[in-house]
Image (cartoon, coloured by chain):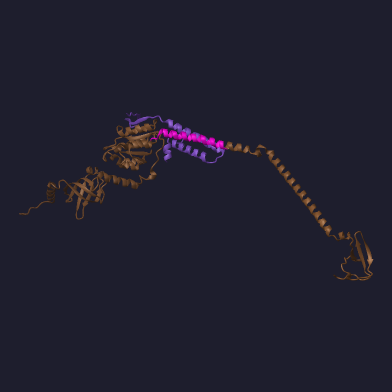
Chain colours: A brown, B purple
Amino acid sequence: MDQRRILSVSAVTRYLKGLLEGDPLLGALWVRGELSNFKRHSSGHLYFTLKDETAQLKGIMFRSRADRIPFQPENGLSVLVYGYISVYERDGTYQLYAEGMEPDGRGSLQLAFDQLKAKLQAEGLFDECRKRPIPRLPRGIGIATSPTGAALRDMVKIARRRFPGVNLVIAPAFVQGEGAPASLIKALRDLNTLTDIDCIIVGRGGGSMEELWAFNDEGLARAIAASRLPVVSAVGHETDFTIADFVADLRAPTPSAAAELVVPDWSELRRRVNQARERLDYSLKQSWERRRRRYHELVGRPVLARPLDRIRQLYQTVDGLERRLNQHWTLRAQEASARLGALAGRLEALSPLAVLGRGYTVTKSYPGGRALTSIGQLAVGDWVEVIFRDGAAICRVTGTGGREEG
Amino acid sequence: MTKETMGAGNPECSFEEALERLEQIVKKLESETLTLSQAIELYEEGVRMSRLCARQLELAEGKIEKLLEKTDGSLARQPFEVD
């Protein structure tokens, strides 16, 4: 008879399992570690390994629990996991049956927010070029919000004050709690079917991060991005930023501010239109006035006012020139004749003939007519012509003699 | 694409397009040397735009309504009272 106590594999495993499950510490504990081998099974269960520098711990989280984690667990993420340790009999392994998980160092919601923000940003949903302008004068404005909230009351009040004729269509929605995202998405969709509104405000008044959480929903973010009409987000207070704010075409810091931004100031618009109209009338008047002045200026000019003047003026000029020309020539003639008289007088004074009048004669060779100035030019028997004032005599030289020089 | 969206159901151009055009026309008339016929043509367009703007400012009725889903799933509107 074998005295040894032999147990089946199952019995050992069951025994171990009983030991672990009976342990007060292992029955409910928090474990800190880094996620690795993370896998979300198609069943919705999460499988992972928690590890630190020297050890590893297998873990599982069933779907019912996994669905409540707002953020996306991923490898490398440092987490705190709550649960109990037990044995998975089939594999003979012990593991952590996780019931809760949160990021180590920051809140779950904050991590979820950061993750979704990074994801949508990477998809380009926040890009500036996607932002559509909000029309300056919307024919109607859709508001997706709680019909009983103070936020709606404020928005309506401000909208009416700015533009008494403003048309508003309110699509009631839950703005917090489980069903809020779906409710807001439906409100957006409904408003987008209307043809008499030009933009949509989606929002709610202030609250805690949990209360505003619906506006960080991925589905709502995508619905805003897909909206046919431009969307203005108006969530909480000025310091609250939600995913809806990033994806909206315009972020208003508060619901009241959204009403200020979207609803135009009627009297201001009226003034602008009137002013533009006045300037329009004035500028055309000015334009006409300028032309009228120019016309009068032109017809007032002499050439158009008395067209013959110019010709008369030309005649006058011609006459003047002619007169000046005549004067010029008369003067020149007088000058010439005076000069001629003077020259003639001087010429006369110099003329040898004038000397003859005083009793002198001129002797010239004959024939030849050369004036003789020396006795040496003559010989006895030569013929000479002696010229007197009033005539000449042909004479013959019968004798010559020199004159003693003094 | 935004312009089409804004102008949806609007027979003419939107208020802001009309206002912008009007202000543009005024600037042009004030600063540029135009022929008289150009000036008059612009002026007439400006008058049309200013009338369009003024009309649209008077158009809104000041309705405040709430959307309701009827039992057949279609949408209806009813006046919304705010205190």
- Counting from the top left corner in percent of width and height, residue A344 is at 82, 56
- Counting from the top left corner in percent of width and height, residue B47 is at 50, 34
Q: Quadrant of residue A127?
A: top left
Reply above or below: A222 against A337: above
Kindly report the secondary structure that dominates the magenta region of the rendered protein. helix
Residue at image point 43% right, 30% down? B58
Reply above or below: A51 against A399: above
Q: From the viewer's perspective, is B36 left or right of A222? A: right
Residue at image point 29% right, 44% down? A113
Reply above or below: A390 against A218: below
Tell me if I can see residue A151 in this picture: yes
Residue at image point 80% right, 55% down? A342
Residue numbers of the magenta segment: A263-290
Say if the magenta span includes residue A274: yes
Viewer-nearest residue: A89 or B83: B83
Viewer-nearest residue: B71 or A129: A129
Viewer-nearest residue: B6 or A400: A400
Q: Quadrant of residue A296?
A: top right
**In the rendered view of the protein, which quadrant contains the C terminus of chain A?**
bottom right
Of all residues, the one furthest to the front in this rendering is A406
Q: From the viewer's perspective, is A384 left or right of A56? A: right
Reply above or below: A82 against A377: above
- Counting from the top left corner in percent of width and height, residue B71 is at 31, 30
Viewer-nearest residue: A240 or A70: A240
**In the rendered view of the protein, which quadrant contains the N terminus of chain A?**
bottom left
